[in-house]
Amino acid sequence: MTKQSIFEFLTKAEEDLLKENFVEMKYQSNETIIDQGVPLRAIYIINSGEVRIERVEDGNVTPIALIEGGEFIGEISFADGNPTSARAIAVGETKLSILNGGIIDHLSNLNPRFGVNFYRSIALILSRRLRQTSMKVGKSSFI
């Protein structure tokens, strides 16, 4: 697809409707955006800055990823309904748009096609991230 959007399968009208419901937030460097192990049904779109994803177990911090502007976070908990598996920390000043799951439910009830297009877009992002991770794991195991 040639469209430049995070939600690739949404029409322009659907995306505009979605943007009307964003909540804008700003985080300072090293501020926690999403904590680990909490129920969350929201998607955070990174408008500017970067977000460090890390997992904490037994007091040990394991870095997972650095997510840049134009991407989003929180999609795994949004999709599967489970508590967050990692925490997200702002790297420098970071501006985000937050999309609450209740808004998605409401818009999907009003227009089921919107829901199909939205969740299809989420599935595409999840599959791309899984593919990238699989490629990294495959390369590191043979070096």
Image (spheres, rainbow, N blue to C red):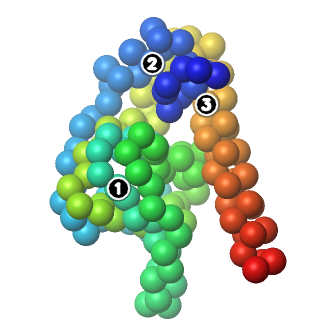
Viewer-proximal residue among 103 and 43:
43
What's the distance in space between the residues labelled 1 and 3, CA to CA? 22 Å
Q: Position of residue 3 (x, y in %)?
A: 54, 20
Helix, strand or loop for disc 1: strand
- In 3D space, how far apart are the residues under numbered discs 2 and 3 (Cα atoms)? 11 Å
Q: Quadrant of the C terminus?
A: bottom right
Q: Looking at the image, is mark 2 or mark 1 nearer the viewer?
A: 1
User: What quarter of the picture does the N terminus occupy?
Assistant: top right
Above or below, 36 against 42 in this view is below
- Tell me which residue sits at (46%, 43%) in the image: 71
Residue at left offset 39%, top offset 15%: 16
Q: Secondary structure at mark 2?
A: helix
Q: Is residue 45 left or right of residue 115?
A: left
- Residue beneath disc 1: 50
Q: Amino acid at mark 3?
A: Ser
Q: Which mark is residue 142?
A: none
Q: Tell me the residue at 60%/36% (across/down).
A: 122
- Mark 2 or 3 closer to N-term? 2
**Label 3 sits on residue:** 121
Q: Is residue 62 visible?
A: yes
Indicate the amino acid at tag 2: Glu
The tag earlier along the polypeptide, 1 or 3, is 1
Q: How many residues crowd mark 3 within 10 Å: few (<14), some (14–19), many (20+)?
A: some
N-term mark: 2 or 1: 2
Q: SS for tag 3?
A: helix
Label 2 sits on residue: 15
Residue 73 in the image, given as x and y percentages of width and height: 46, 50
